[in-house]
Image (spheres, helix red, strand yellow):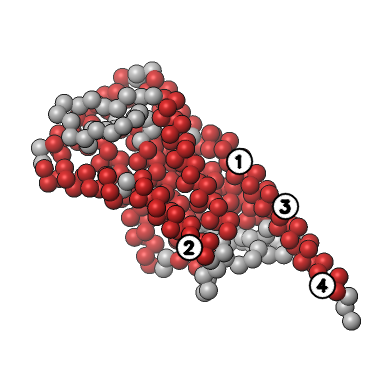
Amino acid sequence: MTPSGSTSRPLSIRFAALRRADLRFAGRLAAAGVAFAVAAVPAVVLVVLIEAHWGPLQTVDQQTALRLHAVVRDRPGLLATVRLLSDRVWDPLTFRLLVAVVVAGLLARRAWRLALWAAATETAAGLIGLLLKMSVARVRPRLPDPVATAPGYSFPSGHAMTAAASCAILLLVLLPSVPQRLRPAAWAAAAVSVGGVGITRIALGVHWVSDVLGGWLLGSALVAATAWAFEAWRGDVGRPVTRVTEGLEPELGAPGGRAPEPPLPGRRPSSSSGGGPG
């Protein structure tokens, strides 16, 4: 008869290994801050150009803002649509609620680590955007015949940064559950939302082009950095490396919809399954 201790030993080894992997995951989420700083170099360059009052950038900012503002100012119906999109459909609160719903769904499916990743990344996007606004302290546009106002500072655009980060989070979490034929539509919807947020904020006269560009760059850099941390955790526990077109947890698209337990310690990671996007 097999001693009872021999059956519990593999489980204890497994749990200990998973705890170590989870601790490394938490550490890598912190290290993702360093990776974010590196990935955000283009946004830092943009800040330097803004602070230096670089002529070509100022010209693009002013001319684009004046032209888009004039288009909506003289068309009441279009202005109402732009306001609806900016203040309701693409408002940061809307994106954050969507991510919160997805996080709740992940918790229900016992995808604890992916839920932590999504919640931490979304929260960091809001906090980093607020900190940078106070640090740069750029004044918002003052256009003739303004059609909208907004509180606080201008750089980076909180709407643009939240849209870029949230749409990337939603794609990376939900893609495994989206049928292959519908994935181009999901990418297109994300691109339209992110681009539309920027255009509407400039047209309303509450942001410069460089504010929006900075928000896009920072939101994308943040998700890239924290997604790297998540992929590193997958490698630690022996899960296969994934591609961005598959999402962060392709296993969620399998029948049953739950994230499986990681492989036993010592199992080598396999290559990503399938010859094309999952």
CA neighbours of label 2 inside 10 A, class few (<14), some (14 to 19), many (20+): few
Q: Which residue is mark 2?
A: 105
Report x, y in % for residue 162. 40, 43
Q: Which residue is nearer to you in this view: 242 or 116?
A: 116
Quick one: label 1 or label 3, which is nearer the N terminus? 3
Q: Which mark is residue 30?
A: 1
Report the residue marked by disc 4.
Answer: 7
**Residue 255 sits above or below residue 218 on the image:** below
For marks 1 and 2 on the same chain, the one whose residue lies earlier in the sequence: 1
Mark 2: which amino acid?
Gly
> Disc 3 vs disc 2: Cβ atoms closer than 8 Å?
no
Task: Give the residue at mark 3.
Answer: 20
Asked whether disc 2 touches disc 4, contact meaning CB atoms under 8 Å apart, the reply is: no
Q: Earlier in the sequence, mark 3 or mark 4?
A: 4
Q: Report how far apart the C-alphas of labels 1 and 3 lie in the structure.
A: 16 Å
Instruction: Tell me the SS state at disc 3.
Output: helix
Quadrant of res 82:
top left
